[in-house]
Image (cartoon, rainbow, N blue to C red):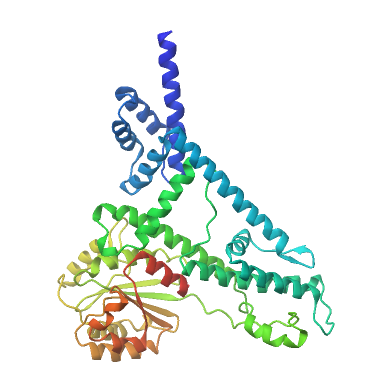
Amino acid sequence: MGMDMDNNRVSELDRHLVEFAQLLRTVGLKVSPSEISDATEGLTLIGMADRDQVEAVLQATLVKDVKHIFAFKEAFRAYFASLEQKEAWQKDAEQKTTQWNEKIESTHQELLFQGNELNITEEQRAVYASLPEKEKQRLRDFLEKSSIGSKIGAPVDHLHQPMVERVLRGSLEYWRKKLNEEDEPILAPGSSDGVLADVERALCEREVEVLSRDLKKISPEEWPEVIRLIRRLSQRLASQVTRRYRAARSRGGLDMRSTLRKNIRYGGVLVERRYRSRRRGRPRIVLLCDISGSMLKYTEFIWQFVYGLSNVVSGIKTFAFGESLIPLTGKLKKGQTFEAMVKEALLVTGKEWGGGTNLAIVLDTLQKMFPDSLSKQTLLLIVSDAQTLEGERAAALLSGINRRVRQILWLNTLPERRWLETSYVKAFLPSCQMYECYTLGHLAQILSKQF
C-alpha cells in the first residue's frame, strides 16, 4: 500500500514536471528528457515543501543559459500559482480570445466588394479590427462606392476587385505602421491557456520595459537577456524587410494619392491606376561606431542589432573610431563580443584604447582609404554623441560624403533636448538625418522606418 502511494506521488510529480517543461519550451527554453529526469531526482530528494528550494532545483536542472532566467522565473510563478489565480487567468484568457475572434470574424462581413470577400491577410484583418470606428467606416465607405460604380455609369465588375484590394492593402499597411509608431502595437490576445497567457503578458511587459530603458543602465547580468531580445527584434525586422522586397516588382506599389486624383472624373471609382517608381535596391550599410568614453556600451548593442540585418542588406562594413579609423569588417570571431573584437583590432593596429574623438580624421580616412565603401547604395550609419575635435572640418567632410551616398543616418546617444549642449550638432544636421538613439525602442523604430 505504501509503495503504491509512493509510486502515485512520483507519477504525479512526473506529470507536473512534464507540463512545466512544456511551458518552458513554449516560451523559448530548450528542455531535454534527461534534464526532466534530473529535476525529478532532485525534487525527490528535497521534497516539495519549500517553494524556494523547489525553484532553485528546477532552475539548476532546467535552465542552461542565464538569458532564460527571467522567462523561467515567470513560468515558475505562473505554473505554481494558486488554483483560484489560475482559474481567474483562464477566464480572462478565454474572454479575450472570444472577443478577438469576434472582431476578426466581423472583418469577413464588413470588408466586401460587390458581396465578395477580399483577398487580404489575417494580419491585415487584425489591423482593420484595431482601427478607430471612424477609420473603419471610411474604408467601408470606400468599398461601397467602389462596388456601386461611378455616377457617370462607368462599368464596375468583379474584374476591378484586385485593384480595390491593392488600395485597401496600401491603406492598412499605412495604418499598421502608424499604430506601431504610436506605441499601440497590433497584438492578438495571446494563448487561450490562462497560465501561458499570463507568462506571455509578463514577458511582453518585460520587453517593453527593456525597450524603453537607457542602454547604459542595463547591468552586465542583464546583457544575455538583452542580446536575445536584440536578436529577436532584428530577426523580426529582417523578416519584414524580406517580405517587402519580395512584394516589390518591376514597378512600385500603388500611388494612392495620384490614383484618386486621376479618378475624380469617374466619381471616385478607381478605374485607372498610378504606380510609384521602382523601389531602390537593397542598401549597403557602412557602420561607424564611436568607441570613446561611455559610447562603447551603446555601440555594442546597436552593432548587435544592425548585424542581425546582414541577411537582408547587400553587405555591412564596420569601422570603430576614436581619434582614428579602425576597420573591423571580417574581424569578428564566433561568440566574440564587440568590445573584444575592438581590443583585438587595436592590438593589431597599434592604437590605444581611450582618448578623444576626431571625426574629421575619421571621415577623411574613410573616403581616401575605403572609397569603394561610399556609393549611391550606401547607407552610412554613424553611432556617436557628436562630441569631437575639429567639428567644423568634420561637418565639411560629412557634407561631401553625403553627396556620394544614399543617406547618412546619425544615431545620437544623447537625448534630443541635450543636442545643443554639443558644439557642432547644428553643423552636422544639414548633411544627415539625426535621431536620438539611447534605447532599443528608439533603434527598432528608426531602422523600421528606413527599411
Tell me residue 209's x, y (percent).
36, 58
Quadrant position of residue 353:
bottom left
Residue 421 to residue 161: above or below = below
Dividing the picture into quadrants, the one containing residue 295 is: bottom left
Q: Is residue 401 visible?
A: no
Percent position of residue 326, x then y:
24, 74
Q: Tell me: residue 273, above or below residue 206.
A: below
Q: Is residue 11 left or right of residue 291?
A: right
Q: Residue at x 35, y 84 (%)?
A: 371
Instruction: Residue 376 in the image: state x and y as whole percent.
Output: 44, 84
Q: Nearer the viewer, residue 203 or 136?
A: 136
Q: Position of residue 362 (x, y in %)?
A: 25, 82
Left or right: 204, with 281 as reference point: left
Q: Picture quarter containing residue 360?
A: bottom left
- 147 vs 79: above or below: below
**Residue found 50% across the figure and 37% down from its top:** 87
Residue at figure coordinates x 42%, y 25% from the top left: 13
Residues 343 and 245: in front is 245
